[in-house]
Image (cartoon, rainbow, N blue to C red):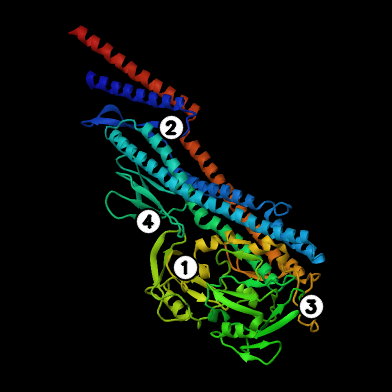
Amino acid sequence: MSLTAVLNNAASGVIAAQAGLRTSSDNVANTNTPGYARKMIDQEHRVLGGIGAGVEVTGVRRIVDTFLVAAGLAASSTASRWDTIASSLDNAQSLFGDPTSDTGYFSSLDKVWTTFQSLAQSPTSGILRSQSVAAVESFLDQTARINAELGRMTTVADARAAGAASDINDLLAQISVLNKEISRGSVVSGDTTGSENVQAGLIDKLATLMDIKVQPRPAGGVTIRSVEGHELVGDNAAVVAYRSTNSTPGYLAIQHAVGPEQVITVTGGQLRGFMDLRDTHLPGLSEQLGEFAARAAERLNAAHNASTSFPARSTLQGRDTGLDLPTAVSGFTGQSTLAITNASGVVQRTVQIDFTAGTLSVNAGPPTAFTPASFLTDLNTALGAFGSASFTNRALTLSATGTNGIAIDEGTSQKAGRAFSHFFGLNDLVRSSGHTTYETGLRTTDPHGFTAGQTITFRLSQEDGRPIRDVTVSVPAAPTMNDLLTALNSNTTGVGLVGAFSLDAQGQLSFTPGTAPPVAVSVSTDTTSRGVGGPTLSALFGLGVIERTSRANRLFVNPEIKADPNRLAVSKLDLTVAVGAPAISPGNGQGANALAAAGEKRTNFDAVGNLGALNVTLIEYAAQLGAAVGSRASSAETQRLSSESVSTEVSTRRASVEGVNIDEELVRLTTYQQAFNASGRMIQAAREMFDVLTSLV
């Protein structure tokens, strides 16, 4: 071997040892640097013409475990998702207060029952009347306040989801730039570990925002894909867009420089947490609150409509039923009695309505027939000079003439679970600015009442919010509810391929998924109207998230009763008294007793949020709702702790692989130092041999 070859071998050893010393020195210097992964040099024998020619440094690489990296990214995404959800639901739970406290939300309804109990003992007390009205108003105000805050939190979650998408775009762009830098450095076998460490930190941040899959690129850098494999970063970065509307679920889409927009799956990270809060958790709480408050109002109104004030009110103004009068009257069964009373509570005239027989009877006289179409005319005839009935804007109004008042004995009348006065809301204690109960009483043979050609558009979505397609259904010219159901459930122009709408015995319209996993149906737009100025299809039947989550904001105390608590119906009409005796008396507290007992009446509650359909009392449902709110928050907290535990464990193991061990680096420093000295001595020996040879010449 020539001296030149010896020198080249020794020089290569010096260069390799220097590279090794630099990497170990960098490792030691970055012992406590977050996100730093230790590095090592790769060496291989250099052979020229079959003869060893020293050593060559082929590159510098980071020491990472790809399995632990992937596991860490997945754990970080899951932990971030549940941390986002848990913190928000904890705040949502605090809105309801301590269920055992006298100042919590649920105690406000207990105060309603308590004040009415006190009023039943002293029905003439003006102070107790005012306190009772104030207690109902306080309950409704707290309901609206909580629901408004839930709505604000939903809006914030939506905005933060959009913000997370913007942050994702920034990270993808930076990762793409680093891909190019790392690729250029890899071509010349340079040390790219600095850029790789920076890129790894960006990837870790990205994983906290959404779940990703990361693959190394042969030329250096990484390819990042979504869960189902759509490329987010490769040669270039895709642009991520968060899409949502007020009435449909949010989803994520990506756009490359070339090609159409693609919808992608997001199952982890803060973005998924915000989307879950916006589309599931917070609306679920709002729907549960709305169901609770609406049923509480129903029970109070049922008791109030079955009672009367003293003296009886001269006018009973009904609510907007959303129906035309013939359809509203059709389907009633049983009997109800209207009584015109004077200022002393003495009955002046009675009109008994027998819905089953289809007859009206004045002062217990011979019955005369009526039909749903002729009901208003026949009722006015029966009332005669003592009163009148009118039907305007889908609301029934009964009035007494002069100084008389009108009181109602609900009797056995019934439709959609409500008696006559209750169904029309003639003497409601709690009013609403829209529809809050969706048992319309409509049957499949009843006219649907919507204008032919009007449309409602449904968004069909996957469980995670990804849209499948929009379906626009036109109101059919055929007139019945059965015809409308047929149009809604069409396989070609309706939702028939993914489920079916049905009308139950109480006239409530609901959708049942028919696929596994189930397809979610939301209302995108609704231009329908039941009659001129009437409710839309979604408003009448409570379809879509907007209708369901806004119920709790719509309830308020009847302004007439709020202005004059003496109009509170704390008495009962007694038609069994002798002629000339008052059928209503000021000391009668039976109505107040009925209001106080309203919370103990069993009620049908719809399945909302994470509560199934129940038949329980309001008091029992309040306990169920409080438990459900706490359970939702507790479950999220458990998921958070569990996922954080996994993330911490993976991070610890990853640090044991990637982190710098001072003892190991000292060994390497010593090894490289000795290699450097050995190569230096070899160069010195070659030099001395060269000097000897030169002196011999």
Write down the residue under mark 4. 263
Residue 488 showing in the rendered view: yes
Spatial CA distance of label 3 from label 2 is 96 Å
Reading the chain from its start, which is encountered first: label 2 or label 1?
2
Q: Position of residue 235 (x, y in %)?
A: 29, 44
Q: Which image quadrant is residue 362 in?
A: bottom right
Per the image, label 2 sits on a secondary structure element best described as loop
What residue sits 63% from the left and 59% below the top?
628
Depth check, front residue: 616 or 180: 616
Q: Position of residue 64 (x, y in %)?
A: 43, 38
Which amino acid type is shown beneath numbered disc 2?
Arg
Write down the residue under mark 1. 516
Write down the residue under mark 3. 582
- Farthest residue toward the top? 695
- For the N terminus, give its image quadrant: top left
- Farthest residue toward the left? 697
What residue sits 71% from the left and 64% below the top?
619
Which amino acid type is shown beneath numbered disc 3?
Pro
Write down the residue under mark 2. 38
Which amino acid type is shown beneath numbered disc 1?
Ala
Image label count: 4
